[in-house]
């Protein structure tokens, strides 16, 4: 990739995205597919585009994204985080607006691990006094 690209890494749950930004026409390619084909639910596409709408820069940048791990919801959050970081690298003046929107904060929530002697993380066998 040439020097005209700006890079941002995004993470959410177990998903990791690598986002490459360059000035362009507004296309978003995810794992070689257009965003509309990769994320079929409109809510997930809206999540991905939130940083662009906050800054009012829809249609000004092209994004090439590779994402792996987790499910579609976690991947959408990872892409959003990566896009925000790439925009910040492109122009540092976007920091306040992105920070106020909460797009630069890495969501720390993860799946809790399963404990031994229990069927799931918090589920326990039924209690009986006798």
Image: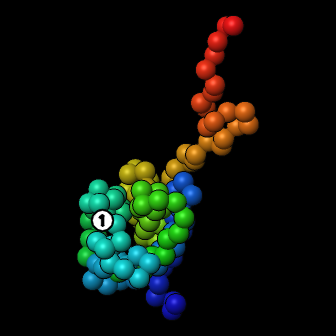
Left or right of 82? Residue 50 is left
Using the image, determine if residue 13 lies above or below residue 2: above
Q: Residue at x 67, y 7 (%)?
A: 129
- On-image quarter of the C terminus: top right
Query: What residue appears at the point 43 percent right and 51 percent down from the top-left corner?
Result: 102
Give the image location of residue 8, x and y in percent. Answer: 51, 71
Quick check: 24 above or below 56?
A: below
Percent position of residue 112, x then y: 61, 42
Q: Is residue 97 left or right of residue 66?
A: left
Q: Nearer the viewer, residue 22 or 129?
A: 129
Q: Residue furthest front?
A: 130
Residue 81: give x, y in percent of width and height.
Answer: 46, 61
| Callout 1 secondary element | loop
| Residue furthest to the bottom | 2
Q: Nearer the viewer, residue 16 or 95?
A: 16
At x 63%, y 25%, the residue is 125
Q: Local crowd at mark 1 within 10 Å, few (<14), some, or many (≥20)?
A: few
Image location (x, y in percent) of residue 109: 55, 45
């Amino acid at each position: 990739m040439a020097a005209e690209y700006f890079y941002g890494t995004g993470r959410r749950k177990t998903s990791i995205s690598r986002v490459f930004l360059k000035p362009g026409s507004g296309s978003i390619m995810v794992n070689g597919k257009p965003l509309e084909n990769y994320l079929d639910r409109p809510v997930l596409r809206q999540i991905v585009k939130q940083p662009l709408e906050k800054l009012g820069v829809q249609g000004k940048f092209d994004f090439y994204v590779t994402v792996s791990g987790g499910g579609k919801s976690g991947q959408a959050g990872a892409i959003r985080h990566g896009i925000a970081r790439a925009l910040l690298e492109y122009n540092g003046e976007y920091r306040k607006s992105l920070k106020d929107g909460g797009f630069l904060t890495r969501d720390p929530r993860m799946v809790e691990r399963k404990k031994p002697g229990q069927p799931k993380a918090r589920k326990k066998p039924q209690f009986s006094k006798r």
